[in-house]
Amino acid sequence: MPTLDDLKKRIKSVKSTQKITKAMKMVAAAKLRKAQENAENGRPYSQKMKNIILNLTKSINDPQNAPKLLVGTGKDQTYLCVVLTADRGLCGGFNSNICKLAKINFKKILSERKELKIITVGSKGLDQIRREYEKYIIKKFSFKNKKQITFSEAEIIGNEIINLFNQSQFDKCILFYNNFKNVITQIPQAQQIIPAENNSSENKEENLTSYEFEPDEDEILEDLLPKNISTQVFKAFLENAASEQGSRMTAMDNATRNAGELVDKLTINYNRSRQAAITKELIEIISGAESL
Amino acid sequence: MSENFAIEIVSPNKSVLKEDTEEVTIPSFEGEMGILKDHISLITFLRPGVITIKKDNKEKKFFVEEGTVEFSNNNLLILTSTAKSLAELSRDNVDDLIKNSQEKIGQKDVSDKEKYLLSHKIDVLKHVI
């Protein structure tokens, strides 16, 4: 049975923890609004970029000579996995969810006797993946000191991917990140960016417009595809940033509520022990008086 | 029938401009290009220059460094990471940009194509204000 003093101390410490989580929740809520806005503003760009490329792909008449970034190298021996996570913890299952999905994929790739290469972005994901897959990691990025991630950061990573591709370091590139659906739901996602996935291309055949190209298709594609990689990375960044704040907000909200429950429980405990102590003292006095 | 078509300028961070307009002049890769309603479907690049959007005898100008343009079904879509409205661009900004480009040209590992683009950019910037 803890003494009254111990209980008092515990209540106090839980209360101060509650204060911290509450503050973190509010900070996350404020940041979330901004991140969400950014994510929503960024969507049209990547969406439209995708559309243009889709249109271009359709008008390519010689798929044999199409740029490799689009159609792939024709092999699928080496996989490059880019795992985007946060630099900070205390955001619920945010980082773990991405890593879990990534690890499932890693296992699958390795079990098929394919080669695996990993690039991590963000220190939290690195920590989790390093435990099992240290030897596969070829590069790690962290933008901890950047307050806001801009397009130029995405370009750094995009350029790195393209560089590796040009050196034929890998055949397929998969991007792992959390897609922001709403504050409570974030869906970890694996998106293949090289070769470009064109899943919706078949049912859209009817709006086949013939475009005039200036300069010709190949040149445009060659310039556009690398840009598209950076754009997709940037989109993943934005979605991730919004997801991180959303996830943190819910996690901290839960923590605050749990702390509140714990305080209530401890307070009842405290009052009960206090009552017991008083009763005990009374009994002692009364029995003392009786024995006289 | 109206002679307007929709123009949209989108940057990675946000949608810069979305409205109806009569005529747009873009600095396409192979020269200035004017676009009116019912232009043929088109995909092209931009080089550094000024996009001019005309409507009701009013002009809006945007400075761009690069970008991709798609025109189809009377929708003009400009994807660029560097659209800046000339109205918001100050003298100092322009001077900074010029200085940056000049420094870049001076570096050794710049290809001829980049050099050409940079010097073109400087030219455009000098005449902007």
Image (tube, coloured by chain):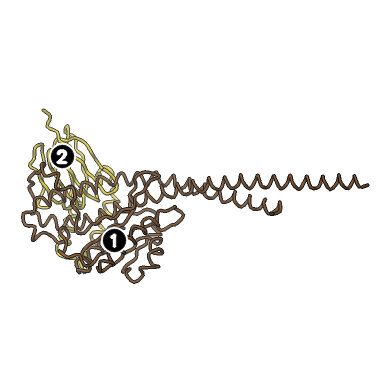
Image quarter in which the N terminus of chain A is found: bottom right
**As drawn, A113 above or below B70:** below
Q: In what element is the residue under mark 2?
A: strand
- From the viewer's perspective, is A149 left or right of A269? left
Amino acid tagged 2? Asn
Where residue A5 appears, as percent x and y from the top left, is: 70, 53
Name the side, left or right, on which A52 lies relative to A3. Answer: left
- Disc 1 sits on a residue from what chain? A
Q: Which residue is mark 1?
A: A157
Furthest toward the left, the residue is: A61
Q: How many marks?
A: 2
Q: Mark 2: few, some, or many residues within 10 Å (few <14, many ≥20)?
A: some
Q: Position of residue A172 (x, y in %)?
A: 22, 62
Residue at image coords 31%, 65%? A118
The residue wearing badge 2 is B75
Q: Disc 1 residue type?
A: Ile
Up-down: is A9 above or below A183? below
Q: Chain letter of disc 2? A: B
Report the front residue among B120 and A207: A207
Which residue lies most toward the right here?
Answer: A292
Chain appearing in brown on the rendered image? A
User: What secondary structure is marked by label 1?
Assistant: helix
Chain with yellow colouring: B
